[in-house]
Amino acid sequence: MMTSTIFGSPIDTGAITADIPVTKDVAHFRVSVTQKHTIFTYPLDTDDLVYGLGETMGRVNKRGGRYTSFNTDTAEHEDSNPSLYASHNFLIVWGKETFGVFFDTPAKVEFQIDYQGSGEVRVECHTRDLRLYQIDGDGPYAITRTLLKAIGPCYLPPLWAFGYGQSRFGYAKDQDFRDVAKGHADNDLPLDYICMDIDYMDGFKDFSVDEKDIPDLKGLAEEMKEQGIHLVPIVDAGIKVEPGDPVYESGVKGGHFCRNVEGGLFQAGVWPGMTHFPDFFQEKTRKWFGSQYKFYTDRGIEGFWNDMNEPAIFYSEYTRPKLGKWTFVLDILFGKYRKEKKARDMIRDYKSFFHNITGKRVRHYDVHNLFGALMTRSTSEGLRDLLPHRYLLFSRSSYIGAGRYGGVWTGDNTSKWEHLMLNVRHMPSLNMCGFLYAGADTGGFMGDCDRELLLRWLAFSAFTPLMRNHTGNFTKNQEAYRFEGQDDFRSILSLRYRLLPYIYSEYMKAALTGDMYMKPLSFCYDDPAVRPIEDQLLVGDSIMIAPVVKQGATSRRVYLPEAMTQVRYDGQDFHCATVDKGWHHQQTQLHEVVLYIRKGKLLPIGKPITNTADYDVEDLQLLGDGDVYDLYTDDGLTRQCTMDNVRQLSR
Ligand code: MIG
């Protein structure tokens, strides 16, 4: 049961597409409305668990933390940092009373959840206009599924987007992409796509290519495709201010850019220098921006990542009127100075530009958290018109509902073990908020990744729908083929491709039926022992994983809520054994992956392939003690995706 209550006159965020009845009464919470804020409080019972909030720091159980929905470009993925790139204002309280609640507002929202032992959930919305959704249901899993149905059908990527991707901030020349493809091919390592970071652009301008470095993008895309590899360029939110440039000119002419306090066009310094931000709140602008992707689709490109769409601002005409571009350099040199000043500048900048929302002038600050989601929508709808089939799209910033249009990656993490664990925690939380196609920068973005961390991270990413190795521009080489002992990398990467029939099927079924792809154990097992467990996950309907997330460990403790079939993959074979309910020691060498098949379930295994072009669902091996498995079969590209595409396999 889902109901809603309307406070003030909120804008339609587009998060929920279902028709949800409106009532005057708010259950569970005490509500107080101040001059500018709406505050909700709920007293927690000592044993209540609190889930949700998607891409935030902290644990899967959000108790004890403080989190702020205010989309921020930040590389500090530390528990002390209340805001990352996204706003997913959905919570589930599970205990004495059990319910879900979604605070639907694009304004800033602060959550304190038994913070410093307060014993209550306190949610402060920095607005008097919002729509509150409340969900009752039989436990957190049922509640989540009600939310996912109300959001609407999840984004469907093409099959190749489930392959392995390689990325790096710094690839610039056409030869760089050829080298990456060759590095994988020469070492027999699988690969399906290579991301192009901002250096492919001409002066960091969207919808352009640096013809000095990449004289023939179309030819390069074709050449790559012959090897089964898709090029996936990055697109940033801002359009460079450059009179004479056709994208800039058509944006100005069409009235597509956000305005400043004086009514002129707002300027913000980002990678290209001064840029204008498209006003994604205008339908005509979403159409205009989305149609610009024709630049790429004309060149045979079918996958994209949208970046800097919080939106990130380095400096602006208000905060750095005189120094301009140089302040950015100074900021980097004097990092400390930057931090506090930057936070203040950021707020000031967000308060100094405006959107046109159905004829009303609205301050960006008040609708900030929706900007990235609307960029994703714009891109997705544009690509829908430009391409006859499915496309890859993932974004850095998001809001609930954007999961209908594309996936997300979790931004600038660091090559450290804590961030592998953060990746494990983010996945179920993101799934609860409707983001099924998700993943982190495998190996880590900031800092240098060593061989052990990369192998363990790959062994976890092998289960996340988005599996992309990405790193920053001044870090050590992080491509799998750069490391010693290629056998181990081949072993882990080959597992991903042998699991593709399962990963693809489970993703498609979950996306089409409003289900989750990755779940906490507590969502499916009514066993108090699983409630605190956050380093084991259910992946799809058949399996449980227990990734190794500690440096130097070759074993870990694992809890089985029921007897399961343990499967050990060593790069060649799948070794099965039955393991009883309870705690066990799981040995896992660096080249191995261990997973568990649930009672009465089956796991289909494909042949070892190195590219999704060779994907084949004939003669699948079936592991586990179940009777039937529902395999999702289509061509991996069609938009005609229904549950009719399910084929039953039986032993
Ligand atoms: O200011 O495009 O999160 O993945 O490599 C940094 C360069 C801009 C941030 C993204 C990262 C990307 C980088 N971008």
Image (cartoon, rainbow, N blue to C red):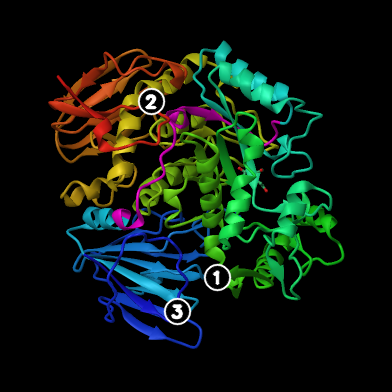
The quarter of the image holding the N terminus is: bottom left
Asked if the magenta segment contains residue 472, the reply would be no
Q: Residue type at mark 3?
A: Ser
Label 3 CB sits under 8 Å from any ligand 1 atom: no
- Residue 323 drawn at (x, y percent): 86, 62
Give the CA distance from mark 2 to mark 3.
45 Å
List the residue tagged with mark 3. 9
Give the CA distance from mark 1 to mark 2.
40 Å
Say few, some or many: other residues with alpha carbon within 10 Å of mark 2 (under 14 / 14 to 19 / 20 or more): few
- Residue 8 drawn at (x, y percent): 43, 82
List the residue tagged with mark 2. 635
* Nearer to us in this view, 617 or 637: 637
Image position of 93 with respect to 189: above or below = below
* Nearer to us in this view, 9 or 520: 9
Q: Which of marks 1 and 3 is nearer the N terminus?
A: 3
| Residue located 20% across and 46% down the image | 524
- Residue 426 drawn at (x, y percent): 42, 48
Q: Residue 358 carries which label?
A: 1
Tell me, yes or no, if residue 387 can be seen here: yes
Apparent side of residue 297 relative to residue 549 in the rendered image (left or right)? right
Q: Which mark is residue 620?
A: none
Label 2 CB sits under 8 Å from any ligand 1 atom: no
Image position of 573 with respect to 3: above or below = above
- Residue 104 drawn at (x, y percent): 41, 68
Q: Give the range drawn in magenta.
A: 148-171
Say few, some or many: other residues with alpha carbon within 10 Å of mark 1 (under 14 / 14 to 19 / 20 or more): few
Say few, some or many: other residues with alpha carbon within 10 Å of mark 3 (under 14 / 14 to 19 / 20 or more): few
Tell me, yes or no, if residue 447 can be seen here: no
Q: Residue type at mark 1?
A: Thr
The quarter of the image holding the C terminus is: top left
| Residue located 39% across and 44% down the image | 436
Apparent side of residue 306 relative to residue 403 in the rendered image (left or right)? right
